[in-house]
Image (cartoon, helix red, strand yellow):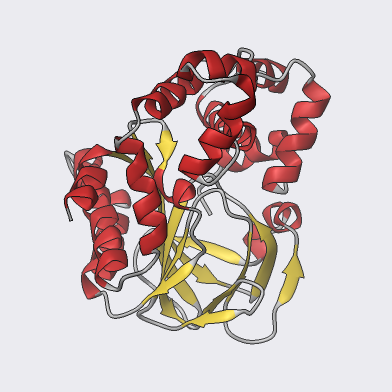
Amino acid sequence: MEDYNRIIESLSVSFVKARNINILRPVTIENNYDVENSLFLVMAGAIRFGKEKEEVFPGEILFVPGGKQISLSFGAGEVISLSKDEFLTHKEQYFKNLNDESFGANSYSSISFDSKVFDSVNFFASLDIPAFVIRNSQKLGNLIREINRENNSSFHGRSRIIKLLTEHAVIELIRYIIKNRLFLEQFATNSTYFKDPRLIDIFGYIKENLSDDLSNKVLANVANVSEDYVGQYFKMLTGINPQDYIEYQRMEMAVNLLRTSKKSIREIGKDVGYKDTAYFCRRFKMMFGIPAGKMRRRESLINV
């Protein structure tokens, strides 16, 4: 129990976006991928996910961890399958963003957020858990709806309220996982972050030096272990190898720069450690399913 409290207390949570959506035409996005975590509250119709197309019914919530490529189907009935790139090009044909709660026959309400341990490790990505359905959690559903109400309002203190509500939602999500004894092995592994200061040093160094050389040799010097051992050590404690973790962090930073800066794609690639712009663009599209330039155009529009 104490480890769970330490995890919760260490988390920094930041709101990314909220949306109420009417689904105009049922659609499947075969390779959906986002760096942030998302909660989808089905209002009417259905959402299906994964290879098995597990169905999420009205009143239920789908949690999709950041950093996971997944098939998502929105709306009941016959669907058309699209890549993420194709969907974003024609999204206005499939989704209508709502500024209120005028939900139709196929609709959902969602929030997206970042949650990091020690302000550097994506918590849910580090657990390496799959998307899953949350049932019988009226409190979490109410929080999702309230965050959307605040997001669509012009009340004073709106941003502060959204931040507090998002933190509450993340805690309710973790409480649900613990109460239902989900992913206990992953939680136990995650608690190792609090027991090995060398790992924390590596996380901190990676965060501060994404544009520099982050080879295993460099990480070995940070942790004061051998170059041959550092990869095994990192994977033993986190479940992933350090270079995969580094690429995820670089791409997460690239998305943030696309959202918040006017830097060129070349500059962004360089800022996150890619000297070869063409290689950066290839890796970006492979990870997100869309080119970096299209990601920027998407982020400049209303969130859908």
Instruction: Report the residue at 34% width, 69% height from top.
Output: 101
Q: Residue furthest bottom?
A: 77
Q: Does residue 162 show up?
A: no
The spot of residue 86 in percent (x, y) is 76, 56
Q: Image height check: is 104 above or below 109?
A: below
Q: How many marks?
A: 0
The spot of residue 50 in percent (x, y) is 61, 71
The spot of residue 18 in percent (x, y) is 39, 53
- 66 or 6: which is nearer to us? 6
The quarter holding residue 16 reads: top left
- 125 or 219: which is nearer to us? 219
Q: Does residue 28 show up?
A: yes
Residue 268 lies left or right of residue 147; in this view the side is right
- 5 or 191: which is nearer to us? 191
The spot of residue 44 in percent (x, y) is 44, 81
Instruction: Report the residue at 23% width, 75% height from top.
Output: 138
The quarter holding residue 193 reads: top left
Q: Image height check: is 100 above or below 236?
A: below
Q: Image height check: is 174 above or below 77?
A: above
Instruction: Report the residue at 75% width, 64% height from top.
Output: 82
